[in-house]
Image (cartoon, coloured by chain):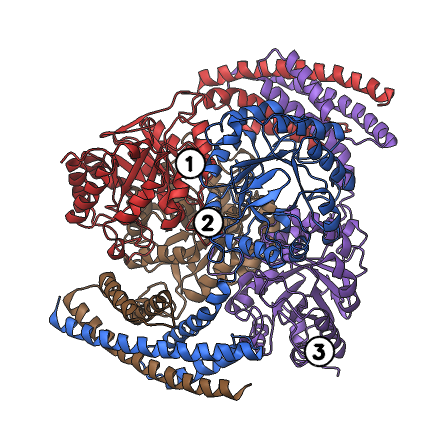
Chain colours: A purple, B blue, C brown, D red
Amino acid sequence: MDERIHEERRKIDEVNAEILRLISKRGEITAQIGLLQTALGLPHYDPERENQMLIALVEANRGPLSDEAIKQLFKEIFRASLDMEECQDQHKMLYSRKVKPEDTRVYAGPAVFGKAPLLIAGPCSIESEEQMMEVAGFLSGHGVQVLRGGAYKPRTSPYAFQGLGKAALLLGRLAADRYHMAFVTEVMDTRDVGLVAEYADILQVGARSMQNFALLREVGQAGRPVLLKRGMSATVEEWFYAAEYVLAAGNAQVILAERGIRTYEKWTRNTLDLSAVALAKQETHLPVVVDVTHAAGRIDLLAPLARAALAAGADAVHVEVHPNPRVALSDNQQQMDFVQFEAFMARLTDLFPMNEVPAVQKD
Amino acid sequence: MDERIHEERRKIDEVNAEILRLISKRGEITAQIGLLQTALGLPHYDPERENQMLIALVEANRGPLSDEAIKQLFKEIFRASLDMEECQDQHKMLYSRKVKPEDTRVYAGPAVFGKAPLLIAGPCSIESEEQMMEVAGFLSGHGVQVLRGGAYKPRTSPYAFQGLGKAALLLGRLAADRYHMAFVTEVMDTRDVGLVAEYADILQVGARSMQNFALLREVGQAGRPVLLKRGMSATVEEWFYAAEYVLAAGNAQVILAERGIRTYEKWTRNTLDLSAVALAKQETHLPVVVDVTHAAGRIDLLAPLARAALAAGADAVHVEVHPNPRVALSDNQQQMDFVQFEAFMARLTDLFPMNEVPAVQKD
Amino acid sequence: MDERIHEERRKIDEVNAEILRLISKRGEITAQIGLLQTALGLPHYDPERENQMLIALVEANRGPLSDEAIKQLFKEIFRASLDMEECQDQHKMLYSRKVKPEDTRVYAGPAVFGKAPLLIAGPCSIESEEQMMEVAGFLSGHGVQVLRGGAYKPRTSPYAFQGLGKAALLLGRLAADRYHMAFVTEVMDTRDVGLVAEYADILQVGARSMQNFALLREVGQAGRPVLLKRGMSATVEEWFYAAEYVLAAGNAQVILAERGIRTYEKWTRNTLDLSAVALAKQETHLPVVVDVTHAAGRIDLLAPLARAALAAGADAVHVEVHPNPRVALSDNQQQMDFVQFEAFMARLTDLFPMNEVPAVQKD
Amino acid sequence: MDERIHEERRKIDEVNAEILRLISKRGEITAQIGLLQTALGLPHYDPERENQMLIALVEANRGPLSDEAIKQLFKEIFRASLDMEECQDQHKMLYSRKVKPEDTRVYAGPAVFGKAPLLIAGPCSIESEEQMMEVAGFLSGHGVQVLRGGAYKPRTSPYAFQGLGKAALLLGRLAADRYHMAFVTEVMDTRDVGLVAEYADILQVGARSMQNFALLREVGQAGRPVLLKRGMSATVEEWFYAAEYVLAAGNAQVILAERGIRTYEKWTRNTLDLSAVALAKQETHLPVVVDVTHAAGRIDLLAPLARAALAAGADAVHVEVHPNPRVALSDNQQQMDFVQFEAFMARLTDLFPMNEVPAVQKD
């Protein structure tokens, strides 16, 4: 390395040190302003002021860096100051492990999310008392603690079966009570939240509703745990922010649910994104469910995907099970029958402790 | 070609004719059953019955086609029968040109969608009376007939500016009235539909709400035209079905809006999908808007995309314009200022007749 | 259920049986034609003939099914006949478990893919002898049997470092030999296949080359195992067909490698698709590698994703490791240093048997 | 606004000015180093040196900004210095309008890309002399100047028709000569470039080969214009860099071709991305073609998409036309027959000047 380069680099080191000193000084003044703003109820971010500073700096710039580069750099400096204040906000992001390092446990009836791995299972739609009693009896006999079933179904077509509504809520509640299970069901309308919360142990916010912000606020005040599905093309960041809506409304009992994202692949209904699960476990303290049924859309992949989900750190797996899928009113291709469910469970024995000690059917 | 092959092909022709005769006979019986089912209030589709037929057929199959092939073929035959009945339903899909061949016009204040190309413009968020009066005056002076502005803002973070709500509705109404424009604004909560309908000429259902089915039904009964944005990863089919929810609720005044879909590309905010526009114009009778601002997320591409949208058949283009974008409370990177808007319009002169005859400012 | 419906359904059953009989008869004639065609060297599929049959059928159709439905149905019937013949072809798809039910093992130096889980590790690019000896020594000391390192680098920009070429091949070979490892490296140009095959134990076909069909044919004849990465937006089907190119060229030693697909998500470089791994294990007999480094593009997610990959059935995990990633010539953000690699391994102990019994063999 | 805030802001202004002075001083020293490095043949980017500076700065940091923020900021400062040097490199990016502001024209036989809008048309595959003469005669009679036709076909399955190879090249050349057209055909293997360049006027690099870097370099030296298709999930940036490979190899005659990207949408084969076309026209000086056939994959959308493409600034539209698509050997669903082509042209009359003055058939 040429000596002249070393010489110039020593000069750079000195300039670096001076810049550091000035940026730190600037940070102290900014912190001072931040306190004043907070005291006066003013926002930290003042784009007009930033704009004026940039104009003044560009006017003063004599090179060799371009005006564009100077603007870019000072925007970074502004952002660093803002981040310094928002860092405190960040430390207020309720979903973040920085705020709450230990895992959150969510309690729903007999089920505890965030302890040992759980299984959520049940039919796509609640269709009849016979159906629900049969499936709940079967599942609880295999150690499943959380019963799912749709009362309000999000359907692409307005003419498709939309769920039995309140009657279904009642049937779900009855079956869950009979077999000492927790009952989870989807709510889609802000006006239904109160009613659903009367019957369900867990309120599910579906993929299509992940950014229904009014609904998120409403379930945040309903006094029930919330299972929040990731939107079908939501980023991980958007998913966490959706959870923040619920948490910020005062409800700390939030479960995140990954269910696959929409991609070009045609052999599966969606593409299961286990990186999202790993990120959720790492960045948040919330329990995470993986809905392998909606991710795969085909029964033959459920077992390997459930294995992978648990290995990636998921707290629970969600599958659809129906006494007779061929006559189901919705999604009849992807629900397992009882024989298929038992084969599925057999392939999870080593990962699913629950499986080893089948709960005694109490009723 | 070998003579023996010709000989075998003649046999095939005979068998084809016989199969055709039987399938037609089958169709007549099915139609008869369909009439009986309708009379008895029974659904056409009976999966249990189909299942029994398949079991019987597979049992009777002696090859050479595999059981799987036989099942596949008969499922097709069943579907053809069902389609025959649903074809009548299809002829009942309200969005379809098969039901209503002529273009629908949507009337909102002084604006008529579906006649000459229109422009929808205005700020992302409604922030103050000065802002709205300034922008409405400017836009109406350039021939814009529809004023947009957000009162309720869908925001990824619960801590971001959520819009001024009712106060903003009032400001939007005032500015639109003053300059004889139609006012369009987004509604997100079923419980706000009535209020928004009091102030706005057009109710916007945003991309995040495209499958908020309760909201679709509610705006379907609000007595106002509805501008329905395509969801950020909705298929064209899902978009049309979302429109069907509004139409089926009794509201024939629906405008479809393409705003780009979410893809891997990073140089644009979304990927504008003009095939969707072409499909919407071909398969439906509804007017179509293209929101180039949210599609591109950058000002330099707005003009070529607007040109392309109109060439593909769009009835209107939607852009965001703000008197001073640098201080805007939301989306301040993608809103045009007045100078940029005039440059944008200058590049559309040949395609946008409105542009040639600037409306006289009436106030 | 109304008695008249039952009556009509009995008629349907009779018609079904007759259709079945005719379709079977048709199948026999088609099989006969298939034999004649094969004998005469003619293709099975004759679109012109199909077209003539469809025209004749539509002409003969008197309803109640629409001409469109009849065409659709007969196309299905034609396809069923064709499938019957292609089924034999399908039973000739070399990648398929239908052809070869038992798992394929791929042998490369001391490594056996398809037996116990393996680890492939090494730097992104081969940069120097010191680098390669250091990394190979370290990795082999931790039980890694397959050493990776790029000699020809696919780079987005023509001005970026393109790899050291032949010199790198030599260094990779030397390091692998010294530590008794297998050496895998990418080949991109048909004209380089011979040279690379002289030095490498396994020829890697990269994601960008998955549909470089000339290259696939060439590596199919090079006498070395091939590690075939899935293209960044390839469907699972396209991936299997790419493998078929290699297999059909006479090379049975193919390893499939999933490395994430390109989606809208920004927190990871790609989206790891473990459904593809599950499908590959189910539908093919080939060993499957999961490249977690390129999938995640960030070091903190490598361990949970590797765990998930193995749980889903993967035969090997691929990671990038560099003695000093900060000064690496390529991809310096995503390569692990030695400390990070040891932490990574510590999180896989239970799933990775290799980990428990570190190979001694330090030279 | 509180006076104390104003006071603090005045201090900020002073610090800003000082930081600007130092950053500029730093820039001058860096420029000096850059010159020395260039003289010594050293790279500008020295990650090890940057790393040492960061360690020193973090060590010196006493707050209030976090170490992370300081590192982030100085990385920006380093990048600004590097950009200053690379800006000169950027001014060396051959595709960029910054390097060459005026539009490039590409000359191929009688056709000039970059002047008036052109049409490229012809069959998917070259099948016979009759087919090529018939289609070339028809197309040239309608003013088409560029004849396409595949000799080497990229096919997903190794068992599908792979093109007639050299025989097809000859037929394409004959037909183009007979009707005074330019002939474009795809080349996939580096070893075929010389041969294809003997027969074709334009060498097409297909979507699957967009990042076959060896092929890009080879066609860059073949002395023929190159039509470079965007990869099916390539970013716009990657597409431009692929063009740079060809340009950097010495070939200035490059045509960019958008053909749709792979998304989740199922009603079209790909999603046409006209933002990419607008970006290509804005950022590069190269002519741009839009392949509406492969984008849409269905004939009914070709006309509106071609209209949109031309309105967005495309220099040419590419469509597939076959004398009898139903019997075509490949892609028989998406090729237009002659009647469909005339209907397509009729819908472009106003945008396509060529259409108005049909060329006299010269032979």
Kind of element beneath mark 3 = loop
Q: Residues within 10 Å of mark 1 (few under 14, many from 20)?
A: many
The reply to whether residue C186 is visible in this rendering is no
The amino acid at mark 3 is Ala
Q: In what element is the residue under mark 1?
A: helix
**Of A332 and D205, which appears nearest the observer?**
A332
Q: Can you give x and y, in whole percent of width and height, for residue A291 in the image? A: 61, 62
Q: Name the residue under label 1.
A: D239
Real-space CA distance between mark 2 and mark 1, rounded to the nearest whole angstrom:
28 Å
Residue with the mark numbered 2: B279
Q: In the image, are marks 2 and 1 on the same chain?
A: no
Compare residues D197 and D70 and report the one nearer the observer: D197
Name above or below for residue D265 compared with residue D286.
Answer: below
Residue A309 in sight = yes
Choose top left, top right, bottom left or bottom right for residue D355.
top left
Q: Position of residue A285 (x, y in %)?
A: 73, 53
Q: Which of marks 2 and 1 is in front?
A: 2
- Residue neighbourhood size for the residue with mark 2, other residues' Cα within 10 Å, grouped as few (<14), some (14–19), many (≥20): some
Decide: is C70 above or below D321.
Answer: below
Name the residue type under label 1. Trp
